Amino acid sequence: ERARLARLRHTPAVTLDGQAIELHANIELPADAVAAVEAGATGVGLFRSEFLFMNREGELPSEEEQFVAYRAAVEAMKGMPVTIRTVDVGADKPLDRMSATELRHEHVLNPAMGLRAIRWSLAEPSMFRQQLRAIYRASAFGKVRLLIPMVAHLSEVRQIIEAQKRVQQQLSEAGHAFGRVELGVMIEIPAAAVMLPLLLRHVDFVSIGTNDLIQYTLAIDRADEAVAHLYDPWHPAVLQLLASSIAQARAAGKSVSVCGEMAGDPAFTDLLLAMGLRSFSMHPSQIPSVKQRVLRADAARLGGLIDSVLASDDPQRSAELAFGSQRTAG
Ligand code: PEP
Ligand code: MG
């Protein structure tokens, strides 16, 4: 089994009907890029940069420290794309030992709905620009994409684009090299999924964070055991948001990926392919088993089955029946 999985590493992820599928890795620290390459990832779809900011003695990482970390990941990926997400702190990923007052993390009523992720970055503009400068500087060493977490407002996208312009100007003036950096937003708040056509006018790509999208769509705290039985990726509302987001991004000619846990769970590979998804990002250890599902899938046939699944009272059962027969037929 191990040897077979190792061989899979060099097998391109292509469906039976010839659709090339991107299998990217989620990483937390630059050293994880090594495991990503070993697992056969063809890029980093999500570098959770907040891990550079967590478990520290008080100081935030400087621009230089961040630059060194981002450059290390970019160099390890050897020309493959590296999608760096700006800090997504708050809620399940608190900053510890930091000056809570200064960072306005004191007495938060409801952290999941509070000043987190891009909201925090925009409230701390000099910290945000430092991070953007570090990301841009790393883009001189490979293909870097910038991903913004928890976007819910067009005004946030406008502020991000303004910050990007300012940072590019600062870097040019300081004589730093940088490449073209594509801008993407996470779709993980239902509002972003609902107004996706508007967001797509301003960004190059989107990445769907199903972990938070499920949490906010169903109002189920993803970390609360008491309601864990209601946290349901198969919920029809979740599936509708996923399917429409993927379809709208594709119709607009923008690249779309899923980087939440669903992307790395082979139980959802057929479903996501049926929705038209062609780019998945997951923990490196999940890449071989998802690739196995991709190699056995007929994407066009799956696509023809999605409407019946979405219309079903019991989408999970309906998907098992429809996709199961697809597999025996294929
Ligand atoms: C998500 O919400 O699905 C996601 C990928 O981001 P995180 O798990 O880091 O919140
Ligand atoms: Mg998230």
Image (cartoon, helix red, strand yellow):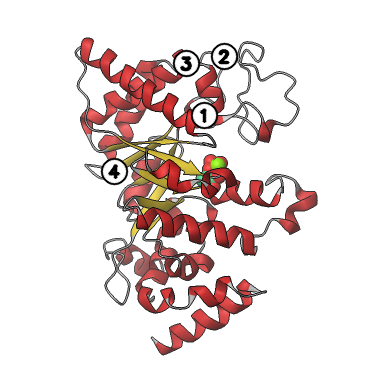
Separation of residues labelled 4 and 1 (CA atoms): 22 Å
Pointer 3 or 4: first along the chain: 4
Residue 306 at least partly seen: yes
* Quarter assignment of residue 57: top right
Secondary structure state at the residue bearing disc 1 = helix
Q: CA distance from mark 3 to mark 4?
A: 26 Å
Give the CA distance from mark 1 to mark 2: 21 Å
Disc 2 marks a residue whose amino acid type is: Gly
Query: How far, Cα to Cα, is label 2 from label 3?
Result: 19 Å
Residue at far bottom of view: 329
Dot placed on the residue nearer the N-terminal end, 2 or 3: 2
Q: Residue at x 37, y 27 (%)?
A: 161
Q: Which residue is most to the right?
A: 226
| Discs 4/1, front | 1
For ligand 1, give the image quadrant: top right
* Label drawn at residue 118: 1
Label 2 to label 4, Cα distance in Å?
32 Å
Which of pointers 1 and 3 lies earlier in the amino acid sequence? Answer: 1
Q: Answer with left or right where residue 258 lies relative to residue 116.
A: left
User: Which residue is pictured at 49% across the width and 73% down the height?
Assistant: 306
x, y percent for residue 51: 50, 31
Residue 47 rendering spot, x and y as whole percentages: 42, 38
Q: Which mark is residue 81?
A: 4
Q: Which residue is mark 3?
A: 125
Q: Position of residue 32 (x, y in %)?
A: 40, 41
- State how far apart marks 1 and 3 are (Cα): 10 Å
Q: In terms of sequence position, does the residue under pointer 2 or pointer 4 come before the other?
A: 2
Q: Nearer the viewer, mark 2 or mark 3?
A: 3
